[in-house]
Amino acid sequence: MEIVGTSKRVSALNTTYYLFIAGEFIVLFFAYNFRDFKTFYLYCTIFISIFVLLIPESPRWLMTQERFHEAYRIFKRIAKSNKKKLNECSELQGLKFMQKTIEKKEDIQLNEQMNESERVEKHLSIYETMKLFFKSKKLLIRSISISINWLTNALVYFGISFNTSDLVGDPYLNFGLSALVEFIAVLVSHVALERFGRKIPYAINMTLTGISLISVMFVPTNFGSLVTVCALIGKFSISFTFNTIYIITAESNPTVIRNSVISACEFFSGLGAVVAPYIQLLGQLYWFPIPYIIYGVFSTISAVSFMIFIPETKSIKVPDTIEELINY
């Protein structure tokens, strides 16, 4: 996302999600054909290892670290693959000039030109970064809301995914339908996020998740197929929001701490993923709709907090410094 223009952010993030869904179908293929878990994990590991060396470093991050030479080489590869010439972009020509300056003068002149605040940001510890967020009430509330939404997305997404084997019908077919619904959700998000922005589509789909899952408590026990329909609707809408929360988080945080913020959000996401299987046990031990009610309540709360505290991020310039984030 850091290496594409404003109009291409959704496409860049969705491409990653498309590959994630493709991975789900590959997992389904391996699981169906290799029932022994050791063989299954072996084939998955071999398949994943192929792509490890194909991912380049973020040139935008390299620029914030003053590694202009490496950033320029990556931009040059991107331009070549797009059949473009770097001399058509004045900013990249400036990058090339900075690269040559560093090579000749060992970075001395560039360091003198750097803004003092940017220089400090590059060396912020995790503790110092947290202090910055607590100093600003707006950023603190926004961060809490984002964290709650990450927790909810993972909790509901993995809760529904783990529950596919308990739904009526063949577990492999249910998993395949779940992945197909997820693919459709990403396709819809591709259009909706570009046309209607990030905030409204996200809030609508998070609310739809809550309604569809809470509705399970009203379904009679002998209508198992209707529960499956409600679960698939919930999977559609939570897949939409899970994809969108990545985009919103990346767009609303500066380059110098973007990876740290997303990593912190991933912690809450991981917490939701860990708790989800235990919530499923409540349905098995007490009452079947309990997990769906919990997921629905979390979804509704997250939708409300998101609408109140999170700003629209469509078409805004991605902030590079913490100062830009505070002023946004």
Image (tube, rainbow, N blue to C red):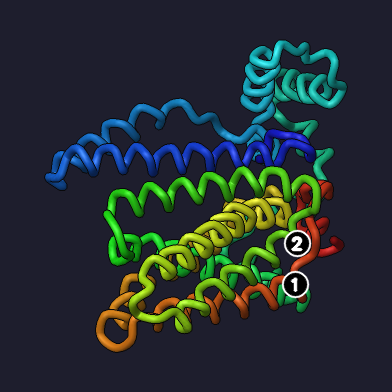
Question: Which residue is disc 1 drawn over?
Answer: 307
Q: Marks 1 and 2, how far apart in space? A: 7 Å
Instruction: Judge left or right: residue 272 versus residue 98.
Output: left
Question: Which residue is disc 2 drawn over?
Answer: 199
Q: Are marks 1 and 2 in contact (CB under 8 Å)?
A: yes
Residue 51 sits above or below residue 207 on the image: above
Where residue 32 appears, as percent x and y from the top left, is 22, 42
Residue 122 sits above or below residue 233 on the image: above
Q: Quadrant of the C terminus?
A: bottom right
SS at circle 2: helix
Which residue corresponds to the image point at 40% horizontal and 81% vertical from the top-left?
220
Instruction: Judge left or right: residue 232 versus residue 286.
Output: right
Which residue corresponds to the image point at 54% horizontal and 71% vertical from the top-left?
212
Where residue 84 appears, as percent x and y from the top left, is 75, 13
Instruction: Judge left or right: residue 40 versus residue 20.
Output: left
Outermost residue on the bottom side: it is 286
Can residue 267 be seen in this snapshot? Answer: no
